[in-house]
Image (tube, helix red, strand yellow):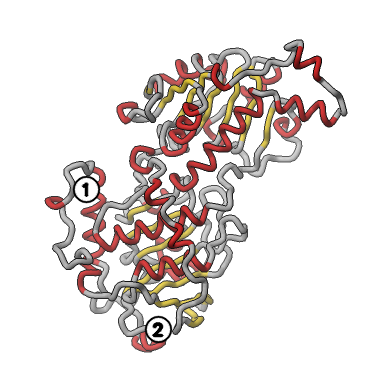
Amino acid sequence: MGSGGDRRRARRDILLGSGRHHAAGAARTPGTRARRVAGGASVHAEHAHGSHPSGPDRAGGSRDGSAPHGARDRAPSQSPRERRYGDRLHAARTEAAPRPGDDRAAPSPGRADRLHRRVTRRLVVDLASPRAAWRVPPSAVQAIRDALGEAWEVVEVHAPAASDGDGGSGTPEANAAARGAEIYVGYGVPAGVVQAARGTLKWAHTGTAGVGASLPHLKGTGVVLTNSAAVHADPIADWAIAAIAYFARGLDRLREFQVAERWARVEFADLEIAVREFGELRVGVFGLGGIGGAVARRALALGMRVAGVRRHPERGGPPGVRWVGGPGDLGRLAAESDCLVIAAPHTRETVGVVTREVLERLPTGAIVVNVSRGTLLDEAGLLDLLDAARIRGAALDVFSAEPLPAGHPLWRHPRVLVSPHVAAVTTRFWERETGLIVENIRRYLAGAPLANVVDLEAGY
């Protein structure tokens, strides 16, 4: 039930070391021009002027000309899953070379003349979100071109890409651009893209943390999917800690008194309003993966006591966590938590798992924080316990129905903080996202296991 944090735990060397990529020039490379791909979709074909020349080692081996990465030359510390995905990626790279009669993989002679005579492989960038925070900047596209090298064609789709939730709705332009693509980078992986790139698509990356919308049409295709859970972990964890403080320190009541122009010093000084210190709080994290682990580390640093539940408790948690249990320990976690943070992914096993019965096991005056998906939480049960003053407050960034419908009782509840699914929003998203994509491109070209690989069966 964790978010796979052991394999993508913040990965600071990848995500925070990305400044050099983010700062890449924004101008289009010489020779780039607009063109139309099959189906009449308007896109831009941008060939890469990378820092490394293309050559045979690009398709099958490492940059230094050594033998392709195989099971025998991998580090002993790699897990069986990493070895499996490494083998799949090596096979994918070997199979990706253009084959006689495969008009989807190789550009036509006329198209090659317009682009670059050495371009034989394609990556599609479908990240033109209507939202400023998620819209790919030119510097990120430039960094992708630089990482790939001259043997690759980079096609940037300029049609608006849906970036809300798990993404994946797709556009005709993206479908047209995906024909013959080996790598696709977007918000979710639309069914139309998977169909259009059938037989050539080897790796797809989504800028979202959730992948539920992409799973049905990726299962059984052999395509490796990576996500951006680690990219979102730090800002979401910051939001979760701020939400705990909002209720624990009585900031919600201060705002209420301010609106009423009431100097409520007596109410606080006479302890009519409970105010708690971080050092006395017990935090229970449900889903101790990438996001949950980041929450746990911050809570521990502030003196809170932390326990957690995850699908694989043997993977443990950050140093200092009191105990880590499995799914069957969720009730115990609730009973021992002054603050319950829901950070597990949406899967078949987690839908509706935070039931009224689980919430009733929370101590009186507990705080509930949900940064996962609204489908995990019994919202009706939560409202009943809030109305009965059993729960101090609930900070919710996600809901079972989004946008939250007008007139929903959560909107006006005095002990609920409604956040419109924006806990991950900061100005640093592309710094981290570019670092992750570029690092994974380098791993892909080297035949090494990728970061943030999604288990298509587990759903995260």
In this rendering, the answer to whether 87 lies above or below 297 is below
Q: Residue at x 41, y 87 (%)?
A: 114
Q: Is residue 290 left or right of residue 411?
A: left
Q: Along the line of sight, which residue is nearer the eye, 72 or 159? A: 72
Quarter containing the C terminus: top left
**Residue at 33% of width from left, 54% of height from top?**
224
Instruction: Kindly state the secondary structure of the residue where label 2 is placed.
Output: helix
Relative image position of residue 27 (x, y in whole percent): 51, 75
Left or right position of 236 against 312: right
Which sits earlier in the primary sequence, circle 1 or circle 2? 1
Q: Quadrant of residue 322?
A: top left
Residue at 44% of width from left, 37% of height from top?
347
Residue at the spot of label 2:
115
- Residue drawn at x 81%, y 26% is 257
The amino acid type of the residue labelled 2 equals Leu
On the rendered structure, is 210 left or right of 112? Answer: right
Is 4 left or right of 240, judged from the image as shown? left
The numbered disc on residue 270 is none
Q: Position of residue 315 (x, y in %)?
A: 32, 30
**Please, what is the three-letter code of the amino acid marked with disc 1?**
Arg
- Mark yes or no: residue 351 visible: no
Q: Which mark is residue 83?
A: 1
Residue at mark 1 to residue at mark 2: CA–CA distance: 36 Å
Q: Which percent across, then down, holds residue 293?
A: 43, 34
Q: What is the x, y in percent for residue 227?
A: 42, 50
